[in-house]
Image (spheres, grey):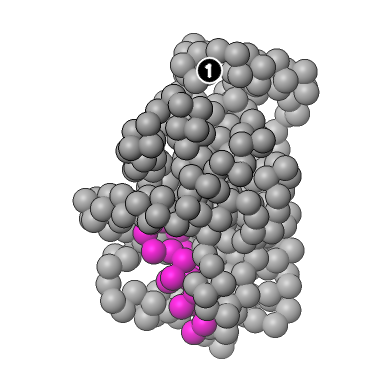
């Protein structure tokens, strides 16, 4: 980021859920006088504040934020939508700043922004509808078994608790005869900016403690009421996610509240593992300990050397 560098810089702060990405990204943006662009596939939804740990105005620290509470759950967004939106956010930011901070835990969104997405065949709407209907009638176990049988490559990715992605994968393989995983290793497109990626890590037990505490904080902050207000929309894909699915099951009397809370903690820990697996496969990622009190200065130093 020295004076000889002409291209603007995207400073990516990545890591698993509850790793402290938001506060660190805000501090970086304050130091650099720039904006934060979220790369979170759920914090963008206005109605999903508590269960996504979306930063409040106070937590945003006066820093301009993009893709935070910007869309309704009735607007289903994809990584391709995000790519288009985020490139626009970067263009706006780079009109005034040479650096932008991207913060998030959705690996596919970060890939879309930094490297572009694979061109993929379109899945006919009738196949999507038929797969969705079968899932609504027969449930998660049926979906898991269908994926294991028809797309074992996807089943091996460890995303077998994510109905939205599983439905997409099943519809895709039924329409094309090809696993959706075959479209995850494209040739990166050239971007008009440089990218520096920093990954935050915690010792596993500390991260799990942070996750458990965050879930308890969400419950205390009113997660059940937030989810209850979304009952009319429970069929929508954005709400088939950790923290919401479990409370819907509690509200449907399938689980007690303590059971639902434990499931949220368990599923969030599982999600954090999947995030780490994704990010660790990125050889450009520079890993730094998130519990370092000087982490912001460390990241700025790394960026300066790049």
Q: Is residue 20 magenta?
A: yes
Compared to residue 304, the image places residue 17 above or below, namely: above
Q: Secondary structure at mark 1?
A: helix
Other residues around mark 1 within 10 Å, as few (<14) / some (14–19) / many (≥20): few
* Magenta region, residue range: 9-31
User: In the image, residue 166 lies at what x, y percent?
Assistant: 55, 27
Instruction: Residue at 58% x, 78% y: name it.
Output: 63
Left-right relation of 86 to 182: right
Residue 279 in the magenta stretch? The answer is no
- Residue 109 at what x, y percent from top left? 58, 50
- Using the image, determine if residue 273 lies above or below residue 82: above
Query: Can residue 160 be seen?
Result: no
Is residue 76 visible from the viewing direction of this image?
yes
Give the answer, above or below, for where 33 lies relative to 216: below
Residue beneath disc 1: 139
Residue at screen point 55% across, 13% down: 138
Which quadrant of the figure has residue 255?
Answer: top left
Question: Which quadrant of the figure has residue 221?
Answer: bottom left
Position in image of residue 285 (x %, y %): 42, 58
Task: Give the residue at x 73% y 25%.
Answer: 123
Q: Seen in the image, is 15 located left or right of residue 46?
A: left
Looking at the picture, tell me which residue is in the foreground, 95 or 253: 253
């Amino acid at each position: 980021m020295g004076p000889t560098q002409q291209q603007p810089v995207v400073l990516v702060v990545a890591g698993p859920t509850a790793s402290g990405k938001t506060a660190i990204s805000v501090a970086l943006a304050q130091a650099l006088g720039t904006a934060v662009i979220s790369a979170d596939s759920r914090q963008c939804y206005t109605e999903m504040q508590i269960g996504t740990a979306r930063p409040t105005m106070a937590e945003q620290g006066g820093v301009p934020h993009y893709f935070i509470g910007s869309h309704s759950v009735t607007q289903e967004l994809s990584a391709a939508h995000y790519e288009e939106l985020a490139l626009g956010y970067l263009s706006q930011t780079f009109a005034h700043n040479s650096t932008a901070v991207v913060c998030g835990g959705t690996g596919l969104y970060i890939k879309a922004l930094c490297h572009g997405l694979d061109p993929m065949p379109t899945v006919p709407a009738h196949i999507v509808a038929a797969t969705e209907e079968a899932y609504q009638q027969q449930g998660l176990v049926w979906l898991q078994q269908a994926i294991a049988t028809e797309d074992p490559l996807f089943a091996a990715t460890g995303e077998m608790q994510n109905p939205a992605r599983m439905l997409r994968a099943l519809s895709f393989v039924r329409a094309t005869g090809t696993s959706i995983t075959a479209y995850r290793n494209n040739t990166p497109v050239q971007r008009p900016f440089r990218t520096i990626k920093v990954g935050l890590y915690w010792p596993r037990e500390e991260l799990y403690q942070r996750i458990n505490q965050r879930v308890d904080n969400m419950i205390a902050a009113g997660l059940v009421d937030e989810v209850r207000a979304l009952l009319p929309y429970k069929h929508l894909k954005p709400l088939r996610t950790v923290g919401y699915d479990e409370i819907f099951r509690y509200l449907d009397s399938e689980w007690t509240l303590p059971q639902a809370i434990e499931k949220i903690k368990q599923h969030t820990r599982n999600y954090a593992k999947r995030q780490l697996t994704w990010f660790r496969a990125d050889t450009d990622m520079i890993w730094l300990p998130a519990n370092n009190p000087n982490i912001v200065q460390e990241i700025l130093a790394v960026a300066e050397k790049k």
